[in-house]
Image: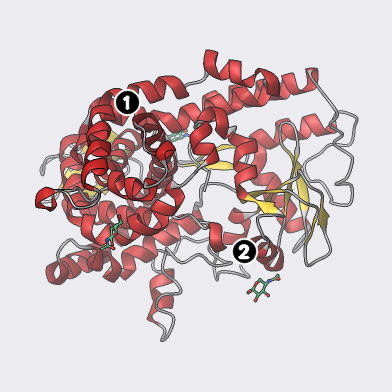
Amino acid sequence: MLTDTPSPATLVVGIVLALIVSQLIWKSFDPRSRLDAIPSVGIPHHPFGFYFGAWDYIKNGRAITEEGYRKYPGKAFKVALANRWLVIVNGRTSIEDLRNASDDYVSLAEATNSLLHLEHTIGQEQYRDPYQITVIRTPMTRNITGCFSDMRSEVVAAFEDLVPAKTDEWISLPAMELVLPVVSRVSNRVFIGLQCRDPDYIKITTQFAVEVAQDAAWFHITPTVLRPIAALLFGHLETATRRAMKVVGPMLQHRIEMDDKYGRDWPNSDRPNDLISWLLDEARGHPARRSVRTMTRTLLNVNFGAIHTTTQGFLHALYHIAANVEYVEPLRAEIESVVKSEGWTKAAMGKMVKLDSFLKESSRFAPGGAVSMLRQIVQDFTFSDGTTVPAGTLVGIPILAAHHDEANYANADSFDGFRFSRMREQVGEGIKHQMVTPSLDFLTFGLGRHACPGRFFGVNEQKLMMAHVLVTYDLKLRDGVRPEDEWIAHIGAANTTAEVMFRRRS
Ligand SMILES: *[C@@H]1O[C@H](CO)[C@@H](O)[C@H](O)[C@H]1NC(C)=O
Ligand SMILES: *[C@@H]1O[C@H](CO)[C@@H](O)[C@H](O)[C@H]1NC(C)=O
Ligand SMILES: *[C@@H]1O[C@H](CO)[C@@H](O)[C@H](O)[C@H]1NC(C)=O
């Protein structure tokens, strides 16, 4: 998912500017052309309706998509983004159509690129050759079991460092400032080993996603021919690469040399089992992938995909549990009993059915936004319901409304942490309702072959962190009320400023 958390303030500024400038340098865009047959939502009826609608969408994207969902059940509708329409396709068949369509018609890569300007924000090499996706999907996912004790020890160390809680008093900590570095450390423990603790590296990896979003907003309003120059002058990619290379460059140099010399069979079987090794395996026979610079960029890109997504998922869940402390005891009981027989292992995470359910419910409730599975149509495409969408159109699905539809879930608007564990108790329904299994009712990780390849890693990481927090601390919110999410257009981020209170359990 690409609903990472760009800093809301910078993004507002970016989008406002995009809006103004796109009017000034207006080219051949005609908002009324080939999408006429699809009804629009949130557009006032006057000549500048599109722009007023686009401005309104920035502020009220969630309400506008909900309105469309109610008004056009099972049908497509369109909303105004700063400089183009977004067609929101609705109904299970249309979502299936999107899942089934080949990349020649419906492209995730093109959508991502047109929103994020990947060539300039994550770099040419990564844009042209995103081989890390294969690495995340297979060797990394398969190696979670083997890396689990490292992940566990990093979780413990990171919370020890960042939560100075005592047994006899409550302390209050800004949740985002706590969770972001923890997630960076735990993820990078598996990516690069103990260097994950380097303060500079943590800063670079946690800031990078924000910089990508910020740069993308600027590139959006820069004419195409000027973008390479703008990237050099204002982009953050070069600086981030240089700073990251200062930390990981010597290590990467050493690893490349050892790989050239020994391949997988280092003397004394000393080869680390980490992302660098898996990347190098996948880079054999591809010299372009085997430079310090390219590998640094790959690392930045993997961090871009991993850190903010997991942070958001975990933050939403942390606020949910702190606001619903009645879940703490049953979850603790499950965690303590499973750990007693299985230890802190991936197998143990698999047995924490209630914890899985709680995290999944949190993610059903707050999937990171109102629209997801963004795709760009690359050849005119006709959905099963007859809606035709021309090439070049951005499409998405109304995830929040679907997750809150009574047709998909009973009492869809109430938070029910053990909803999915009850479903799993039914015979034969065991695996189907796990958090990592995407379905037409649960779309947080997308669906089909483009479903988030890092979800096995990310879900295990979230479970491990939450299990540790619950058995180590009592937690609560000062006023007991879940902090409001922060919305901009259709992106709904967990509150970035709220505090959560911790007390060490005695
Ligand atoms: C999508 O593909 C699946 C399996 O191949 C098929 O069962 C389903 O009917 C297809 N959906 C649509 C809307 O074409
Ligand atoms: C870990 O990843 C490597 C790929 O580099 C693979 O050969 C190995 O089988 C994986 N380990 C497990 C336990 O799957
Ligand atoms: C975030 O939470 C804090 C504390 O509950 C609240 O004061 C603030 O308004 C929230 N932010 C937003 C954008 O709602």
Residue at horizontal 77 percent and vertical 35 percent from the top = 53
Residue 74: where, in percent of width, then height? 75, 64
Q: Residue at x 32, y 25 (%)?
A: 245
Residue drawn where x is 33% and y is 53% of the image: 462
Question: In terms of image quadrants, where is residue 385?
Answer: bottom right
User: Helix, strand or loop at disc 2?
Assistant: loop
Residue 81 visible, this angle:
yes
Dot 1 crowding, Cα within 10 Å, few <14, some 14–19, many 20+: some
Q: Is residue 115 left or right of residue 292?
A: right
Q: Image point 16% across, 42% down: which residue?
A: 157
Q: Quick check: which quadrant has ligand 3?
A: top left
Which is more foreground, mark 1 or mark 2?
1
| Mark 2, residue position | 405
What amino acid type is highlighted by mark number 2? Asp
Question: Viewer-proximal residue, 194 or 358?
Answer: 194
Q: Residue furthest bottom?
A: 427
Considering depth in this image, is 217 or 143 the residue closer to the camera?
A: 143
Mark earlier in primary sequence (1, 2): 1
Residue with the mark numbered 1:
245
- Please identify the residue farthest to the top as the structure is shown: 233
